[in-house]
Amino acid sequence: MKKTLLAAMAMVSLCAHAQLAVEGFETWPVTGWTTHSNGSLEGVIWEQVQNSPTRPSYSGEHAAFLDKENVPNGTVAQDWLVSPLFQVPANTVIRFASRLTIAGDQGSVYKLLLLPSTGNPDVLSDYVTLQQWTELELNPLQTDYILKNVAIPAAYTGTMARFAFYMEGDDADRWLVDDVRVHSICNDPSELSATFDGISADLSWTENGDATTWEIEVVSVTNAPTGSGVVYSGSLPYTVTGLVPQIAYKYYVRALCPDGGQSNWVGPFSFGEDTANVVHGRLDYDSNNDGICDDNNGPLFSNIPVSVTIDGVYAYTVYTNAAGSYVLYGIGDGAHTLSLQVMPSPGLEEQPVLIKEVDFDESPSWSVTHCIIMPEEPFNNLVINFYTYENPRPGFDISYMVKVKNWGTIDSEDITVALEFDVARLDFVAQGSSFNGVVSGNVITLTVGDIEALDQVLGNVKFHVKAPPVNVGGEVINFAAVLSPIEDDIDMTNNTSVYEDIIVNSYDPNDITVHEGAKIKEDEVTNYLTYTIRFQNTGTAEAINIKLENELDDLLDWETFETVDSSHGYEVERNGNLLEFEYKDIFLPDSTSNEPGSHGHITYRIKPKAGFGIGDIVSNTAEIYFDFNEAIVTNTTTTEVVEILGLNDNALRIAELYPNPVKDQLHVDITQGELMSVNVYDINGRLCFSGNDAIIDTYTLKSGIYFVKVTTDAGSASYKLIKH
């Protein structure tokens, strides 16, 4: 463990109140701040950098910066920058400006940590995670600064503590942090609007707190915001002048509260003569039951469907992005009545329809805010997803992501994941430090730990694809990730994630894969099918806009569609069976100038319709549009339902096992012959149970994957069993 003291450490409070000076890292060393590292590479630690085109500051001339580390196999780079001690005020957030340097997702993990005064800054286990992000969750537009606000739990009010900026990853992205402060929560403005006369515009919004001063930034719709605008104190509307009639504009606004706190930037809100009619939507909720709907949880409210009805006629369904927002396009001029129905994840209350009257003759852009009703009764709902956007290639390493979400309203404790992998074709290399993994044969037991309500944990597992002659291309590798059970989980079907991948050599980088593979068993027809569309810009210039069109097979139930993960911020619209994913202003680099940054992907899942059965085949093909180029048509992936035949296709069907996954009792329903014996083995071949009863108590089995051998006087067959 290495540690660099930036200045003499003292029992210093940043401030006993919310009014704190901004730490812009203009001087270095910074009094009271320290840098720490796991020592994987000497010399790579948090440092001060001068403002430059490649490493800009958010404001001033300097920022705190952490470079990437390329560490040996089996180790993980971990670095953290720690504040001085301060007294935690009430109703407080930590605000900072964040920026990355490389487009795409290189697999970095970012955290904001809190350390009680009794903790040791050198010891990571002493810290509490306030929030964790992937690259795309932290900075959806990775080379643009974004202001992040992270709340400090009320339990720490009045105590002395430190906070830390933490990053981990092997040869991952870099991190720039600037303008750090602790301040009281400042509510976001809402209901943005604008009136434009060609040379000036009156901008208005709803103030949801006690702010009387705001910062406003106005840019053309083709430009990215800078994060710095005009400070205005006065009555609304705010008038901006010097505009050009032929140009379309957008604006952003944030509240500047009396105690020095700042809200998030809200927007963009578009206006101008050539601006298309748009409606901006946002999902909020009342997080502290004070009657004010003022909190937006991106992970909680991402990928939520919103059914759109225009003037009494159903139009289409849109899905919220990673920030819990959505945009409606294509509404005609004039006055309209919009009926917007949010359909949240299982367990949340049924939401009322929001009615919004809009008139695009008055303004080309409107905004709405949904106040999500949270349930009175707490519930559990854990979800696991296992995926990758890379291609496994013989002789190369590949990383797979493990995402565990707590969609419930109760904290979950001591969560583990049993990950089964193909040990014949893969060598395990390492897992990210988000997990502690124990490898036994072809199963990795990952200790995820505690997950707070409405939060998630994301980590990666790296494998080496064995080189020829073991793998030459075309081989199938299988994975199964299974969550440890929690009591009263309202949906057990999302506690298992299976993935079938195909090893490739030369390949088309624009493709579609189905995680569950080319064949599923008849007892799996009610489960989700998970699809990933991968795309790469192999042109000679940046791709400004990318659109994926994906027409769903008639055998798929589009009412069950939900997105799982995306490499970049996106908008998705569903009209009947047609899906359209749009990546606007993505500026995806070309492969010749930035190969790692030229990739992207979208992952979603959907269930087959009722009646889907043996012999039915689902097909899926996508069309990918880079700017105004012709569509690139992907391969066609298929999934067929086959008869249950145990582990091998030629195994005799003599029994059906249910439920599978199982919790406390397994039922063995004999279909041929008389039952003679039932033996249960773990994944290492050890006998765990032997008997001749049709009902087996399984509560003593640990969570994981087992094999059940059923023998009757007509023969024997083996079946895979998942224990929750």
Image: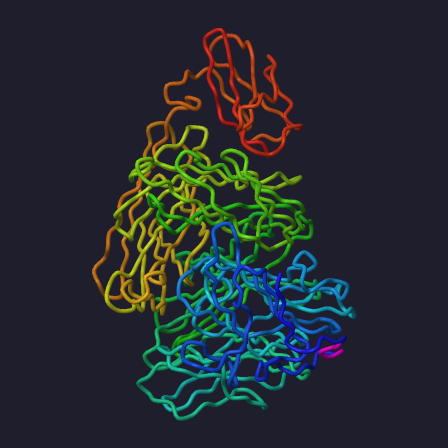
Q: Quadrant of residue 30?
A: bottom right
In the rendered image of this protein, does residue 389 appear above or below residue 444? below
* Relative image position of residue 362 (x, y in whole percent): 42, 80
Quarter containing the C terminus: top right
Q: Residue at x 59, y 84 (%)?
A: 27
**717 vs 253, nearest the viewer:** 717
Q: Quadrant of the N terminus?
A: bottom right
Residue at far left of view? 630
Q: Who's the residue at 24% across and 55% down the image?
A: 632
Residue at (58% x, 49% y) in the render: 435
Q: Could you say where residue 127 lies in the image, as x and y percent from the top left?
A: 68, 60
Q: Relative to residue 334, is residue 243 depicted above or below?
A: below
Farthest bottom residue in view: 242
Rendered position, 12 above or below 135: below
> Image height check: is 510 above or below 116?
above
Q: Is residue 13 magenta?
A: yes
Q: Residue at x 60, y 34 (%)?
A: 703
Q: Position of residue 604 (x, y in %)?
A: 42, 49
Residue 607 sits in which quadrant? top left
Along the horizontal axis of the image, is 483 left or right of 556? right
Answer with left or right where residue 517 lies relative to residue 37.
left
Q: Nearer the viewer, residue 397 or 158?
A: 397
- Prevailing secondary structure of the magenta residues: loop
Q: Say which of 713 and 160 sits in front.
A: 160
Q: How many marks?
A: 0
**Side of 719 where 296 appears, left or right:** right
Q: Residue furthest front?
A: 42
Magenta stretch bounds: 12-16
Colour scheme of the rendered structure:
rainbow
- Residue 482 appears in the figure: no
